Amino acid sequence: MLKQIEVKFNKDIYKKEAIVTSINEFSQAATFSLSEEEKYYLVSIAEIPAEIVSDIENEFCNYVLFLMKV
Amino acid sequence: MPEKKKIIEVDISIYPLEAIFGASYVFIDRAYIYLDSKQDGVIQVALQGKTDIFDDKTIAGEFMNELLNYVHRLNISKYNHVIRERVVERALYSSVGENLMDSDEEEFDDPLGIAVPWEEKYGDEKKNEK
């Protein structure tokens, strides 16, 4: 298990519901937590297996974006 | 996998957020896409191809084309929505109207002649008896 990653999602662009749903979908792959700043939702990703550490951030962002369209 | 990201700045007064989502959706199978906004009215779209096939210039150009396509579709939808509503209303009305006519013309099955008025059925016999 490696590293912790933090991803920011702009509140004017992304919906919290999409982020929460994505966290639930990805919860088996790593440990996620959600917090907020004034303009951003902050998603912390921890306990990431080494084999997916290079992809998980990008795949997570894409999934949130996918849910925005749906 | 290419690490380099291409950043496109999109003016949302020209390309609405809905168009950005629509264009992004088309690309999520071949690129990683991240959206942010550092200034009002402008969205930064960060694109990174998933494979070496898509270099940053190609993918940015294709994304802008898709964005334009989506804006065009949104405009057409906006201008034609009244016509589309009328067409749907007409189609539904025609369907409902036909069903009402069919129910009026439906034949009533009466093998024992129960629905025949008594006067009509026995009226002549009564007159003959008198």
Image (cartoon, coloured by chain):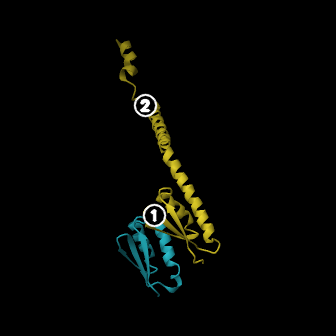
Could you classify mark 2 by the number of other residues whose Cα lies within 10 Å: few (under 14), some (14-19), or many (20 or more)? few
Q: CA distance from mark 1 to mark 2?
A: 65 Å
- Residue at horizontal 49 percent and vertical 85 percent from the top: A49
Q: Is residue B30 left or right of residue B127?
A: right
Q: In the image, what residue type sits under mark 1?
A: Met
What label sits on residue B85 in the rendered view? none
**Colour cyan, chain:** A
Q: Are marks 1 and 2 in contact (CB under 8 Å)?
A: no
According to the picture, the residue beneath numbered tag 1 turns out to be A68
Query: Circle 1: is it few (<14), some (14-19), or many (20+) Cα within 10 Å?
Result: some
Could you say which disc has been placed on residue B112 in the image? 2
Residue depicted at 61% across the width and 74% down the height? B51
| Residue A4 against residue B16 in the figure, above or below | below
Q: Is residue B129 left or right of residue B91?
A: left
Work out whether residue B98 can be spotted. Answer: yes
Q: Residue at x 53, y 84 (%)?
A: A51
Q: Position of residue B52 (x, y in %)?
A: 64, 75
Colour displayed for chain B in the image of the structure: yellow
Residue A53 place in picture, x, y as percent: 50, 82
